[in-house]
Image (cartoon, grey):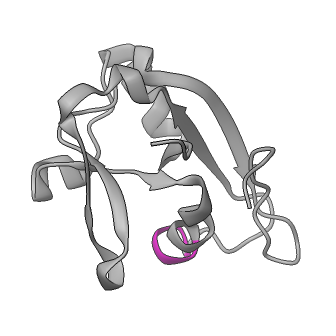
Protein backbone atom coordinates (compact mmCIF):
# COMPACT_ATOMS: atom_id res chain seq x y z
CA UNK A 1 0.00 0.00 0.00
CA UNK A 2 1.43 3.35 -0.94
CA UNK A 3 -1.45 5.48 0.33
CA UNK A 4 -1.18 7.12 3.74
CA UNK A 5 -3.26 5.60 6.57
CA UNK A 6 -5.16 7.55 9.22
CA UNK A 7 -7.34 6.93 12.25
CA UNK A 8 -9.61 9.79 13.32
CA UNK A 9 -10.26 10.43 16.98
CA UNK A 10 -10.85 13.21 19.48
CA UNK A 11 -8.20 14.81 21.68
CA UNK A 12 -9.75 13.32 24.85
CA UNK A 13 -9.69 9.78 23.46
CA UNK A 14 -6.09 10.18 22.29
CA UNK A 15 -5.00 11.48 25.73
CA UNK A 16 -6.62 8.47 27.40
CA UNK A 17 -4.91 6.14 24.92
CA UNK A 18 -1.53 7.67 25.68
CA UNK A 19 -2.10 6.89 29.37
CA UNK A 20 -3.40 3.34 28.82
CA UNK A 21 -1.00 2.39 26.02
CA UNK A 22 -3.68 1.63 23.43
CA UNK A 23 -6.52 3.42 21.69
CA UNK A 24 -9.48 1.08 21.64
CA UNK A 25 -12.31 2.73 19.69
CA UNK A 26 -15.91 1.62 20.26
CA UNK A 27 -15.86 -0.11 16.86
CA UNK A 28 -13.20 -2.52 18.12
CA UNK A 29 -15.63 -3.92 20.68
CA UNK A 30 -18.71 -3.69 18.44
CA UNK A 31 -17.25 -4.80 15.09
CA UNK A 32 -13.89 -6.33 15.97
CA UNK A 33 -11.73 -3.70 14.28
CA UNK A 34 -10.68 -0.06 14.37
CA UNK A 35 -11.80 1.96 11.36
CA UNK A 36 -8.99 3.55 9.38
CA UNK A 37 -9.05 5.70 6.26
CA UNK A 38 -6.71 6.19 3.37
CA UNK A 39 -5.72 9.82 2.82
CA UNK A 40 -8.19 10.29 -0.05
CA UNK A 41 -11.04 9.00 2.16
CA UNK A 42 -10.56 11.44 5.05
CA UNK A 43 -13.08 14.04 3.87
CA UNK A 44 -15.84 11.44 3.50
CA UNK A 45 -15.05 9.87 6.86
CA UNK A 46 -15.10 13.27 8.56
CA UNK A 47 -18.43 14.14 6.93
CA UNK A 48 -20.02 10.85 7.93
CA UNK A 49 -18.63 10.23 11.41
CA UNK A 50 -17.77 13.69 12.69
CA UNK A 51 -20.77 15.65 11.40
CA UNK A 52 -21.74 16.49 14.99
CA UNK A 53 -18.61 18.66 15.21
CA UNK A 54 -20.28 21.32 13.07
CA UNK A 55 -19.16 24.50 14.77
CA UNK A 56 -16.01 26.48 14.00
CA UNK A 57 -13.16 25.43 16.24
CA UNK A 58 -14.30 21.80 16.55
CA UNK A 59 -11.27 19.58 16.71
CA UNK A 60 -10.55 16.07 15.56
CA UNK A 61 -7.14 14.42 15.47
CA UNK A 62 -5.92 12.55 12.42
CA UNK A 63 -3.40 9.96 13.56
CA UNK A 64 -1.15 9.04 10.66
CA UNK A 65 -0.13 5.43 11.12
CA UNK A 66 3.06 3.58 10.25
CA UNK A 67 1.82 0.80 7.99
CA UNK A 68 4.78 -1.47 8.69
CA UNK A 69 3.96 -1.56 12.42
CA UNK A 70 0.39 -2.79 11.87
CA UNK A 71 1.30 -6.24 10.56
CA UNK A 72 -1.25 -8.84 9.56
CA UNK A 73 -3.94 -7.16 11.68
CA UNK A 74 -4.28 -4.53 8.94
CA UNK A 75 -6.84 -5.73 6.40
CA UNK A 76 -8.28 -3.80 3.45
CA UNK A 77 -11.92 -4.74 2.97
CA UNK A 78 -15.07 -3.52 1.23
CA UNK A 79 -17.05 -1.12 3.41
CA UNK A 80 -19.17 1.98 2.61
CA UNK A 81 -20.76 1.37 -0.76
CA UNK A 82 -18.26 -1.40 -1.54
CA UNK A 83 -15.29 0.98 -1.37
CA UNK A 84 -12.13 -0.60 0.04
CA UNK A 85 -11.19 0.67 3.50
CA UNK A 86 -8.37 -0.30 5.85
CA UNK A 87 -9.45 -1.99 9.09
CA UNK A 88 -7.16 -2.71 12.03
CA UNK A 89 -8.09 -5.85 13.97
CA UNK A 90 -6.61 -4.57 17.22
CA UNK A 91 -6.26 -1.26 19.02
CA UNK A 92 -4.01 1.57 17.86
CA UNK A 93 -0.81 1.67 19.89
CA UNK A 94 1.29 4.80 20.38
CA UNK A 95 4.22 3.28 18.45
CA UNK A 96 1.86 2.82 15.45
CA UNK A 97 1.49 6.59 15.16
CA UNK A 98 3.87 8.47 12.89
CA UNK A 99 2.30 11.92 13.34
CA UNK A 100 -0.73 13.54 14.93
CA UNK A 101 -2.52 16.26 12.96
CA UNK A 102 -5.12 18.46 14.65
CA UNK A 103 -7.98 18.98 12.20
CA UNK A 104 -9.92 22.14 12.91
CA UNK A 105 -13.18 23.13 11.26
CA UNK A 106 -13.22 26.70 10.02
CA UNK A 107 -16.29 29.00 9.99
CA UNK A 108 -17.18 27.85 6.45
CA UNK A 109 -17.34 24.22 7.65
CA UNK A 110 -14.16 23.02 5.95
CA UNK A 111 -11.73 20.83 7.86
CA UNK A 112 -8.03 21.55 7.74
CA UNK A 113 -6.27 18.43 6.47
CA UNK A 114 -2.64 17.26 6.69
CA UNK A 115 -0.27 18.49 3.98
CA UNK A 116 -0.52 16.46 0.82
CA UNK A 117 -3.99 15.07 1.59
CA UNK A 118 -6.46 15.66 -1.26
Q: Using the image, determine if residue 28 lies above or below residue 45.
A: above
Count of residue discs: 0
Name the one closer to the observer, 15 or 6.
6
| Magenta-span inclusion, residue 49 | yes
The image quarter containing residue 58 is bottom right
Residue 90, position as x, y percentages in the image? 19, 35
Q: Is residue 112 left or right of residue 94?
A: right
Find the residue positioned furthest to the right: 107
Q: Is the C terminus in the top left, top right, bottom left or bottom right quadrant? A: bottom right
Q: Using the image, determine if residue 41 lies above or below residue 35.
A: below
**Residue under the point 87% across and 78% down:** 108
**Residue under the point 43% across and 38% down:** 13
Q: Is residue 110 left or right of residue 42?
A: right
Residue 70, position as x, y percentages in the image? 31, 27
The image quarter containing residue 83 is bottom left
**Residue under the point 78% across and 48% down:** 116
Residue 26, position as x, y percentages in the image? 24, 51
| Magenta-span inclusion, residue 106 | no
Q: Is the N terminus in the top left, top right, bottom left or bottom right quadrant? A: top left
Principal secondary structure, stretch drawn in magenta: helix
Q: Using the image, determine if residue 18 lies above or below residue 32.
A: above
Please provide the residue range marked out in magenta.
Answer: 47-51
The image quarter containing residue 73 is top left
Amino acid sequence: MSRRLFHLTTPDVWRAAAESGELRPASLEAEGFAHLSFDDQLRGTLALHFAQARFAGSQVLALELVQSSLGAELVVEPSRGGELFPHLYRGVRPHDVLRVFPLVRDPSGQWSLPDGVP
